[in-house]
Image (cartoon, rainbow, N blue to C red):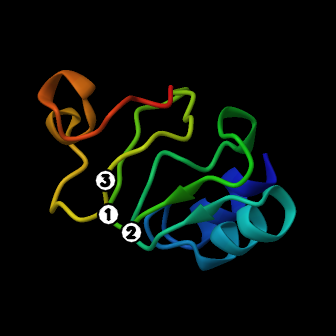
């Protein structure tokens, strides 16, 4: 509830630096600038790092996966073992 209030006061998920600091300090979740829809720590495992410009649907559970960072996108094409870009998916 506090995170919702903070993000609202700071212009929304995309802009809230305070919400990012709270997630990092108290939940060990790093959220990149301009990402949104991911400020519900109960839906995210600790030690998760979310990059910049990511978007998530409401009430989605976010798990760590092996999305390759060397590509310009984290589209499933790049981390689906069937596409032979990674050996296996960590989900």
Judge by depth and name the residue closer to the eye, 35 or 10. 35
Residue 39, numbered label: none
Q: Which residue corresponds to mark 2?
A: 34
* Residue at the far front in the pictured view: 87
Q: Nearer the viewer, mark 3 or mark 2?
A: 3
Asked where in the image residue 2 lies, by quadrant, the reply is bottom right
SS assignment at label 3 = loop
Judge by depth and name the residue closer to the eye, 18 or 52. 52
Q: Which residue corresponds to mark 1?
A: 53
Image vertical order of residue 81 relative to residue 45, above or below: above
Locate residue 87, reporting x and y percent.
Answer: 32, 34
Locate residue 37, reporting x and y percent.
Answer: 48, 45
Locate residue 23, reporting x and y percent.
Answer: 73, 61
Residue 68, numbered label: 3
Mark found first going from the N terminus, 2 or 1: 2
Image vertical order of residue 33 relative to residue 73, above or below: below
Locate residue 26, reporting x and y percent.
Answer: 86, 62
Tell whether 30 sits left or right of 34: right
Tell whether 61 sits left or right of 3: left
- The residue at the point 32 percent across, 63 percent down is 53
Asked where in the image residue 18 lies, by quadrant, the reply is bottom right
Say whether marks 2 and 1 touch (CB < 8 Å): yes
Image vertical order of residue 56 relative to residue 91, above or below: below
């Amino acid at each position: 509830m506090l995170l919702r209030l903070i993000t609202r006061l700071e212009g929304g998920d995309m802009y809230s630096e305070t919400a990012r600091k709270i997630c990092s300090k108290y939940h060990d979740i790093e959220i990149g600038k301009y990402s949104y829809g991911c400020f519900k720590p109960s839906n995210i495992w600790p030690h998760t790092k979310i990059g910049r410009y990511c978007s998530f649907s409401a009430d989605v559970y976010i798990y760590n996966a092996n999305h390759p960072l060397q590509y310009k996108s984290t589209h499933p094409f790049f981390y689906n073992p069937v596409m032979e870009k990674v050996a296996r998916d960590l989900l």
